[in-house]
Image: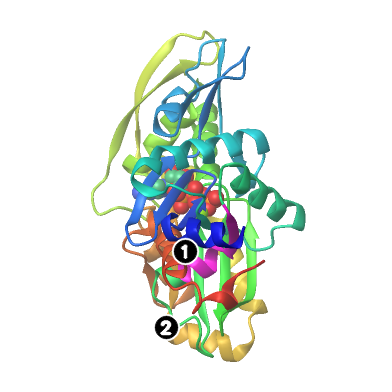
Amino acid sequence: MRLLHGFAGLFAKDMAMDLGTANTLIYVKGEGIVLNEPSVVALSRDTGKVIAVGSEAKEYLGRTPQKIVAIRPMKDGVIADFEVTSVMIKYFLRKIKSRSFLFRPRLIVAVPTGVTQVEKRAVIEAAEQAGARQVHLVEEPMAAAIGADLPIDKPVGSMVVDIGGGTTEVAVISLSAVAYSESVRVAGDEANEAIIRHVQNHHQIAIGENEAERIKLEIGSACPLPQPMTVGVAGKEILTGIPRSFQVDDQEIRRALTEPVNVIIESIKRTFEKTPPELASDITHNGVWLAGGGALLRGLDTLLTDILKLPVHVEADALTTVTRGAGRVMESIDAYRQVFLN
Ligand SMILES: Nc1ncnc2c1ncn2[C@@H]1O[C@H](COP(=O)(O)OP(=O)(O)OP(=O)(O)O)[C@@H](O)[C@H]1O
Ligand SMILES: [Mg+2]
């Protein structure tokens, strides 16, 4: 058995995975990020058979005929539907298998801070069911800090704000541990919801999740833009059900996004209140690091700089920071053992 494991280890390509509410990314040791797909699965309503996974399944959201259902099995950063999550991981692993492994890989999975024992077990079991041999968990803000190249093992405080699809995590890291963290269930998804509500209330038009996200990506902002922007929107009139298209501008979308943006700002402020003065003063010098897709909202860094009066940095490739960090841990697993949760 031992021999077999050792042998398997020779051939298995170890991996790191960011199992996110919006996107799942997989990093293969020695290769880098080989998969980046939406965390969505489309199933047959009758038989439960998988119809599509990832990008293709995301297209189905809000567009499925009666007999197909598109599911996002992760909610608020944790597994909401265990079976579907296992199926999704299995599908993704199989997708990269041909180029990646012959035997069961070791896997590092990034999870939100403050996950419960039950939630941790669920991630480990889902990964094992999908074929992983050994599963290590690392907290997402820790992975983000490593991905952003922050001095995590020094006695110096670093603040990371990871704004994902389901959750925003604010964490202060020092000496390879999370000294203080806070997680709010307001991030990119909630921003989309705010746009849906705004269009509903101000235009009496219903739009889908993907349409709301498109508006956010095209003209969404947290601060006035140098040039005004507008975008065409397609939806249906709530009263009559008739399809309608019209224009919205950056100003009204910015107003719609005020509420979720404020929740994120408040969470950062609360974290500062609870951070010991020495660590807080390190952050005053080094600034706050933003990661996750939500960090890419136009002008969010400028707004935060204004409010906090601190340097605010947005990770260059914010959507991959956590995965790059988890990948780095996988590359030098022995050097990073102290960051594992389990
Ligand atoms: N340019 C952009 N501007 C604003 N939001 C963006 C941009 N690009 C991506 N996003 C948003 O980022 C979110 C996805 O980010 P990310 O992939 O980091 O989340 P996740 O890791 O899957 O979620 P979580 O960490 O909450 O589990 C989506 O809500 C998406 O709309
Ligand atoms: Mg994330």
Quadrant housing residue 84: top right
The one nearer the camera, 171 or 118, is: 118
Q: Provide residue 129's location: percent of width, then percent of height.
A: 62, 42
Give the vertical position of 187 relative to 331 (above or below). above
Q: Position of residue 301 (x, y in %)?
A: 39, 64
Give the mark nearer the N terminus: 2 vs 1.
2
**103 in relation to 87, above or below:** below
Residue drawn at (59%, 58%) of the image: 134
Residue type at mark 2 is: Asn
Which part of the image, by quadrant, shows the N terminus? bottom right
Q: Which residue is labeled 1 in the image?
A: 326
Q: Which mark is residue 286?
A: 2
**Mark sitting on residue 185:** none
Is residue 141 rendered magenta in the image? yes
The label nearer to you, 2 versus 1, is: 1
Q: Nearer the viewer, residue 66 or 185?
A: 66
Q: Which residues make up the magenta segment?
A: 133-145
Question: Which quarter of the image is occupied by the C terminus?
Answer: bottom right
Please tell me whether mark 2 sits on a helix, a strand or a loop: helix
